[in-house]
Each structure stands twice: as structure tokens, then as C-alpha cells.
């Protein structure tokens, strides 16, 4: 119950952060929620661990493991369809570019602000899609 409550609070805060133009905060919230949804999908299909039993820690490797499991898990293919995983992979790279641009000054402040807004808004859209995909996966697995 506590996890469900925390999850709803994070999603609400994501929307509020975007509304209030706190785009960097929104990007971090989206990242946290998306990581959680990937762990949920991995747990539903064998666990959030590698074939050697080591925990999968980063978003990229989690995404790669889901792509690999899609080859053998029909419900995973049905739940995460279309270009969802590719969009998340592109978002991950865009978010990383934003974080590096802030550190290495490769972009102007106005470019960083625009990129932060883009990352936050596309992150919110991905959160919606991945939350729905995880609900589908759980329904398929229980169905």
C-alpha cells in the first residue's frame, strides 16, 4: 500500500513540476518512475537481475534486458508494443545530454532550459505509456 501511495505522489509531483516549470525536477521524477516501471516489468518476467543473478542497476541495461526478453516472452511483446522501448532509449540519451550540458557548458542557458522542458514533457508522456504497459503486462500474466 505504501508503494502505491508513493507512486501516485510521484506522478502527481511530476505533473505539478511541469505546470510550475520546474523542468529539471520533473525530469528526475520521470526518470525515477520509469526506472521503477522497468523493474516492475523485469520482476514480472523473471526478476530484475542478469543471467548471472546480479542486479541490473542502470536504466540502459534494464531497457536492454527487456528488449532481450521480448524475444521469448509473448506477454512482454504484447504489453510493450510499437516503438515504446526505442522512445525510452532516445529519451534516456536526451536526458543524459541535458545533464552533461549543464556540467560541461556545451549549451547556452536558454538551450538548456528548452532541453529541460522537452525532456520533462516527453518524460511525462513516457511515464503514462510505461505505467499503462506495466498494467497490461500484469493483467496478461494473471489472465
Image (cartoon, grey):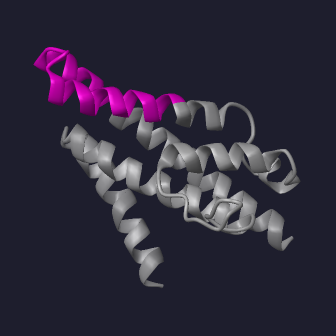
Q: Is residue 113 visible?
A: no
Does the image show residue 13? yes
Residue 81 counted in the magenta span: no
Query: Whole-percent x and y of residue 7?
Result: 43, 67
Task: Spot the residue most to the front.
Answer: 52
Principal SS element in the magenta part? helix
Decide if residue 102 is on the left or right side of residue 123: left
Picture layout, residue 28 above or below residue 109: below
The structure residue drawn at horizontal position 82% and vertical position 63%, both measured from the top left corner, is: 140
Q: Is residue 28 above or below residue 117?
A: below
List x then y, in percent, for residue 59.
49, 48
In which quadrant of the rendered view does residue 73 lie? bottom right
- From this view, report whether residue 83 is shown above or below residue 24: above
| Residue at image location 32% in from the left, 42% down from the top | 27
Q: Residue at x 29, y 24 (%)?
A: 115
Q: Which residues are magenta?
A: 90-118
- Residue found at x 81% / y 68%: 141
Q: Is residue 105 magenta?
A: yes
* Image mark count: 0
The percent position of residue 76, horizontal first and vertical second, equals: 78, 52
Residue 137, percent across and down?
Answer: 74, 60
Quadrant location, the C terminus:
bottom right
110 horizontally vs 86: left or right: left
Amino acid at each position: 500500500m505504501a508503494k502505491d501511495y508513493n507512486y501516485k505522489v510521484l506522478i502527481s509531483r511530476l505533473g505539478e513540476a511541469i505546470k510550475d516549470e520546474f523542468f529539471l525536477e520533473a525530469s528526475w521524477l520521470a526518470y525515477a518512475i520509469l526506472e521503477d516501471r522497468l523493474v516492475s516489468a523485469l520482476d514480472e518476467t523473471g526478476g530484475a537481475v542478469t543471467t548471472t543473478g546480479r542486479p541490473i542497476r542502470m536504466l540502459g541495461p534494464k531497457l536492454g534486458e527487456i528488449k532481450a526478453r521480448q524475444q521469448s516472452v509473448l506477454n512482454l511483446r504484447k504489453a510493450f508494443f510499437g516503438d515504446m522501448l526505442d522512445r525510452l532509449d532516445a529519451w534516456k540519451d536526451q536526458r543524459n545530454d541535458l545533464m552533461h550540458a549543464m556540467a560541461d557548458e556545451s549549451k547556452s542557458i536558454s538551450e538548456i532550459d528548452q532541453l529541460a522542458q522537452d525532456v520533462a514533457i516527453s518524460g511525462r508522456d513516457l511515464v503514462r505509456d510505461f505505467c499503462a504497459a506495466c498494467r497490461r503486462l500484469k493483467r496478461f500474466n494473471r489472465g
